[in-house]
Amino acid sequence: MKIIAATQEIKKVLTSLKSSHKTIGLVPTMGALHKGHLSLVEKSIAENDVTVVSIFVNPTQFDNKEDLENYPSTLEKDLKLLEKTGCDFIFTPDSNEVYDHQIVSEHFSFDGLEHEMEGRHRKNHFDGVGTIVSKLFDITKPTRAYFGEKDFQQLQIIKKLVNIKQLNIQIVGCKICREQDGLAMSSRNIRLSDEHRKAAPFIHQTLQEVKQKAASFSFPELSDWVKNKFEKQTLLELEYFEIAEEKSLQTVKIKKENEPYRAFIAVFAGPIRLIDNIALSI
């Protein structure tokens, strides 16, 4: 495993490998790694000749300066975990390497995907995501790139990005990894207080009940039911719950059979914002 911080160095190394017809898997992360990240790395290792993991906390995708400042940094621990996986390269640039002293976002139009759910609650978030992913793709030129379905909206937007830019990169979506009690794994979980950590599995439990009820209840009825559930859960504050069509991410009021729908949720556990989602069978 080799750690590289310089953009030109990683470019040179990977260009040489690609010229030898090696397939390259990229796992972009912001560090504070957990088993969910490691599952992406393991999948990349299984499917590619070379695996690159990037660790970079991208400032342009944070609409909240405090959230950026408090984002957990555990680089030494991350490197030890990655060494055990057998991945080949860790790319650990600083902001100047990535943004060349100009930390600004490119503006993107993702056919409206960026205006749904997270886009309504996090201003310019997906411009920041599109910018950093574009830069990482340009630097590493991967064969495949791996993203978790916990950030399902982000996953769909990155697929759209590849389509818009006509990039020859396969985007691989990977299932959500969960703690034993159902909480979706997230780097932010380590910032939860003991009290909020005990309450947080309620989010996934609610989504599981939504999945069970989806065939019998209308979507507006389910939305009202979720809101009522959270009004009684004093430790968690519901920011939004929406049922959307998987491809367009547009909120759906009237369901149709055999359409791919997904329920999305964002919740505050004290100051910590948690998101989750679940596929629905109608």
Image (spheres, rainbow, N blue to C red):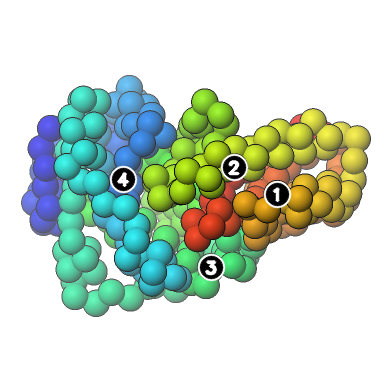
Q: What SS does tag 1 mark?
A: loop
Query: Could you tell me residue 249's position as x and y percent?
Result: 67, 54
- Relative to 225, 127 lies left or right: left
Residue at the location (48% across, 64% down)?
126
The residue indicated by pointer 3 is: 122
Q: Earlier in the sequence, mark 3 or mark 2?
A: 3
Marks 1 & 2, CB-CB < 8 Å contact: yes
Q: Earlier in the sequence, mark 3 or mark 4?
A: 4
The residue indicated by pointer 1 is: 233
Closer mark to the observer between disc 3 and disc 4: 4
The residue indicated by pointer 4 is: 32
Mark 3 to mark 1 CA distance (whole Å): 24 Å
Report the quarter where the C terminus lies.
top right
Residue at the location (19% across, 75% down)?
101
Q: Earlier in the sequence, mark 1 or mark 4?
A: 4
Mark 3 to mark 2 CA distance (whole Å): 24 Å
Q: Earlier in the sequence, mark 4 or mark 2?
A: 4
Q: Earlier in the sequence, mark 1 or mark 2?
A: 2
Q: Taking 28 as reference, is 118 above or below it?
A: below
Pick the front one: 202 or 214? 202
Report the quarter where the N terminus lies.
top left
